Image (cartoon, grey):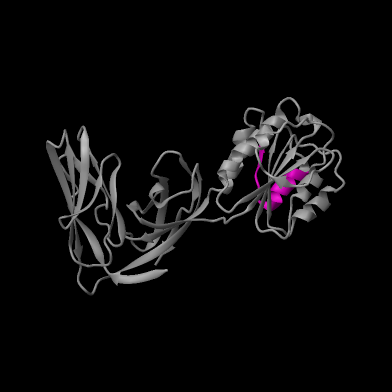
Amino acid sequence: MRTTFAALVLVVAATAQGGVTFLTPPNGAQAIGPQVLEVTSDAANVDRVEFRVDGVLAGIARTAPYRVVFDFGTELASRDVSATVLSDGYRISETAMITTAALTAGETMNVDLVEVPLRVRSSRRLAISDIRVRENSVEQSVREILPLRGPAHFAFVVDRSLSMAGGRLAGALAAVSATQKLLRDGDTASLVLFNHHVSPAEPVRDVADRELTPSGGTSLRDAVASAVDGRAGRTYVIVITDGGDRNSVLTEEAALRAISGTKTIVSAVVLGSASRFLKRAAETTGGTLLSASGSTLRGQTERILADINSRYTVVYQSLGTAAGWRTIAVEARRSGIDVVAARKGYFAQ
């Protein structure tokens, strides 16, 4: 999407005065719409940082990083932006200032809304304030962060055969219980237990407190196929097993056919060696196959959920960069966020 405005270019009057340095907006950037105002300071015992635009208080930051967000709108008038650092019990004051300036009426600029697919591991849903986007080293204004997946059904398929003895089954149920906390509003979940028999799907309730005794053989293919509901929307099947299959009625091909043509993604955490069926099911549906031990089972199960929840689209307003190839850099503003992958750039005319 592209909108044309008369150009507004940021002119730096002073990026640093004393121990105060402006980080954003940077020298030479264009200032339009919501922008992050951020400074650093070498002052000790900072009490507060006051940001002003044209002498009017725009925001206060009390702890590092010292930043606020201000909407410059589409007004082409010159704007004075200052940051005053008050420290040492408000006895010391240092100020830095930048100035925006309108150019002549004949000059124009292009404002592009850019969509960047990315994968982010985070313990909670991302907010705009969590992500920083730079284009050709110029910080951009993030408009939206959109989760790529809507509400979905999660089918946990847990092996309760004799080979899951020795605390493996209890660990699997504990992992399912913990992983439920990563589900989002609107998600649903069910539990399918199997050995040589496949139990009907049941709601997931306090599974970690259930006392189940591992017994019998293994009908892995039958269990996975039973968790697939072609009438439902997106379904994530998450299998926890030791990987074997000795008792399924369905052949490998029949089970894969039951999955194909549905909105089902099969992932698995395997305590041992994964069967060829699990490998093919994960590969063909775009799922994840992880190996685990008893001590890592919960973490690996949560990792699959975190990966499912990691896909976002960041929408930002491209400002301050020239035509041609534009390099995109996405990074987290806070700890606990891991940017796994993101679009690296695009070509703009």
Residue farthest top in this picture: 166
Counting from the top left corner in percent of width and height, residue 91 is at 12, 36
What residue appears at the point 22 percent right and 41 percent down from the top-left corner?
A: 48
Residue farthest bottom in this picture: 106
Where is the N terminus found, in terms of image quarters?
Answer: bottom left
Magenta stretch secondary structure, dominant = helix
The question of residue 191 being in magenta is answered with no
Q: Nearer the viewer, residue 34 or 113?
A: 34
Where is the C terminus found, in terms of image quarters?
Answer: bottom left
Q: Quadrant of residue 158?
A: top right
**As drawn, is 133 to the left or to the right of 6?**
right
In the rendered structure, which segment of residues is drawn in magenta?
277-291
Counting from the top left corner in percent of width and height, residue 248 is at 85, 43
Q: Nearer the viewer, residue 200 or 291?
A: 200
Counting from the top left corner in percent of width and height, residue 122 is at 49, 43
User: Can residue 42 be seen in the rendering of this structure?
Assistant: no
Count the marks. 0
Say above or below: 200 vs 298: below
Residue farthest left in this picture: 91
The question of residue 290 being in magenta is answered with yes
**As drawn, is 36 to the left or to the right of 20?**
right
